[in-house]
Amino acid sequence: MLKLYFAPGTCALASHIALAEAGAPYTTEKLDFKINQQNSPEYLKINPKGRVPTLVTERGVLTETPAMLAYIAQTYPRAKLAPLDDAFEFAKLQSFNSYLCSTVHICHAHKMRGARWATQETSFTDMKAMIPKTMGACFNLIERDMLKGPWVMGENYSVGDAYLYTLTLWLDGDGVDIATLPKVKAHRAAMESRPAVQKVLAEQKA
């Protein structure tokens, strides 16, 4: 049985959706960021990074969304959540997920995690002011060059779709009008029609 540690509104949603889409047996534990539970001694024993998501498997602990998504897709191949029989296509999926992790997520994090990069309040203000521009640029690139449609990889749904959907949910709060991104907007609507996504959203609200 897999166990996913998550917090609502975080990138852990992607792995949660992937588990549900895969039909994997799993349990979840919600962390309360408002009381800094991610940095509690108990949780740091599980994930010393003090972040989510964390996936506990029978072989050990996994962290970092791209790695967890690849693990889920490879562990449950019948769900067809990645092009596992084509090394090049699988690498392209990894490239997409890595961009979301290394660039898009970092741009978003400048809004509330400025202390990771600076110490002055004026720096935090500048970072926050840049969010609509930097997140807008990221998603314009995704819209124009990366999202094949209807899914990330074209006709075949993959774990990349769960990840893209998760970050798309941040756009309103980041000052980016999704109406200017018709492919991304259609992708979000398609995701929200999927039973697994609806199931997970309900679980995260519970």
Image: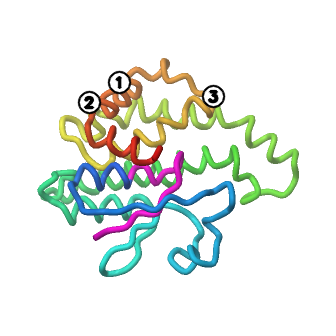
5 falls in the magenta region: yes
Q: Which residue is mark 2?
A: 150
Q: Nearer the viewer, residue 36 or 131?
A: 36
Secondary element at image label 1? helix
Q: Most extreme residue toward the front, as rendered?
A: 206
Residue 175 is marked as 3
**Mark 3 or mark 2, earlier in chain:** 2
Residue at 52 percent of width and 48 percent of height:
8
- Image coordinates for residue 199, horizontal then vertical, percent: 32, 43
**Mark 3 or mark 1, earlier in chain:** 3
Give the answer, above or below, for where 102 lies relative to 154.
below
Tell me if label 3 and label 2 are in contact, CB under 8 Å: no
Residue 119: quarter of image: bottom right
Residue at 37 percent of width and 37 percent of height:
146
Q: Nearer the viewer, residue 199 or 91?
A: 199
Callout 2: few (<14), some (14-19), or many (20+) C-alpha neighbours within 10 Å?
some
Q: Nearer the viewer, residue 148 or 69?
A: 69
Give the answer, above or below, for where 170 lies relative to 176.
below
- Image coordinates for residue 157, horizontal then vertical, percent: 23, 41
Looking at the rendered structure, the kind of residue marked 3 is Gly
Q: Which residues are magenta?
A: 1-14
Residue at 38 percent of width and 72 percent of height:
56
Secondary element at image label 2? loop
Tell me if label 2 and label 1 are in contact, CB under 8 Å: yes
Looking at the rendered structure, the kind of residue marked 1 is Ala
Residue 186 is marked as 1
